[in-house]
Image: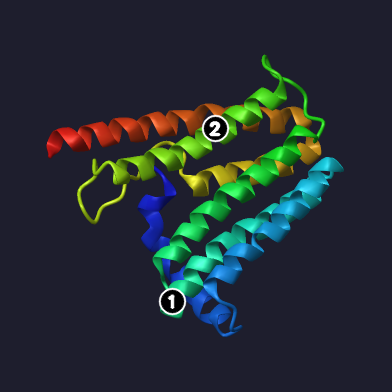
Amino acid sequence: MTLYKKREKFSGISRETGKALSKAGISPNTWTILSLIPAFITMYFLFEQDFIWASIFFAVAAFLDFVDGSVARASHRVTKYGAYLDTIVDRYVEGIVLFGLIFAGLPDFILPIAAWIFLYLFGSVMTTYVKAAAKEKELIPEGKELKGGLLERAERLLLLFLGLVLGYFSRECLTLVIVLLAVFANLSAIQRIRIAGKSTKQQ
């Protein structure tokens, strides 16, 4: 079961976080842009093959990704552009971190590690794209969004964080996590395509 189905369990934390940080006077869009900074720092530490610091700053980037929406809702500043910007920056953050992993000295597994990283990034982008395409082509009923699949963004971030921590102890473990992310991210995209197809038949 994906985390979005349990979103109500986190709504209280999100609400209180948004209230607290909205007092800083920083706009939601600024919080979104700020997530790029720890992403670049994560990339740097991956270049240095320092997985502990890389995992710490990756966690900061993920936290800031959580903060922007919380602040927007708490301060009643939710906008279409903010949601758009958040989606774009999310892809940049993921891409920056995965670029750093190419140079992290990870061992290959059947395919070169760079191939697995590419497949992971491709699956991640496609999972988002099939959602946007379904909405653009009006395959999903008005007011609804295409969700579901084995790995949503939250699950991908969590698994990648755990992989970075494991990378400190064993680079082979981090490679295996990337392989799993590559496989399941693409399966998630395929699942969403099927969900969109079923939704079309029901209309």
Q: Is residue 194 visible?
A: yes
Q: Amino acid at mark 2?
A: Phe
Q: Which residue is mark 1?
A: 77
x and y percent of residue 89 in the render?
57, 55
- Viewer-side residue, 109 vs 82: 82
- C-alpha distance separating marks 1 and 2: 32 Å
Is residue 121 rendered to the left or right of residue 5? right
> Residue at position x 15%, y 32% from top?
201
x and y percent of residue 66 in the render?
54, 62
**What is the basis of the colouring in this image?**
rainbow
> Residue at position x 71%, y 42% from top?
164
Decide: is 89 above or below 176. below
Q: Secondary structure at mark 1?
A: loop
Q: Amino acid at mark 1?
A: Arg
Is residue 53 rendered to the left or right of residue 195? right
Q: Secondary structure at mark 2?
A: helix
Decide: is 173 above or below 19. above
Is residue 88 rendered to the left or right of residue 165? left
x and y percent of residue 95 in the render?
64, 43
Q: Is residue 166 visible?
A: no
Res 10 → quadrant: bottom left
Count residues near mark 2 (Cα–Cα under 10 Å), then give few for <14, some for 14-19, many for 20+. some
Decide: is 143 above or below 76. above
Q: Which residue is mark 2?
A: 122
> Residue at position x 60%, y 70% from top?
30
Q: Are marks 1 and 2 in contact (CB under 8 Å)?
A: no
On residue 112, which mark appears? none
Decide: is 188 above or below 146. above
Count residues near mark 1 (Cα–Cα under 10 Å), then give few for <14, some for 14-19, many for 20+. some
- Viewer-side residue, 66 vs 96: 96
Q: Quadrant of the C terminus?
A: top left
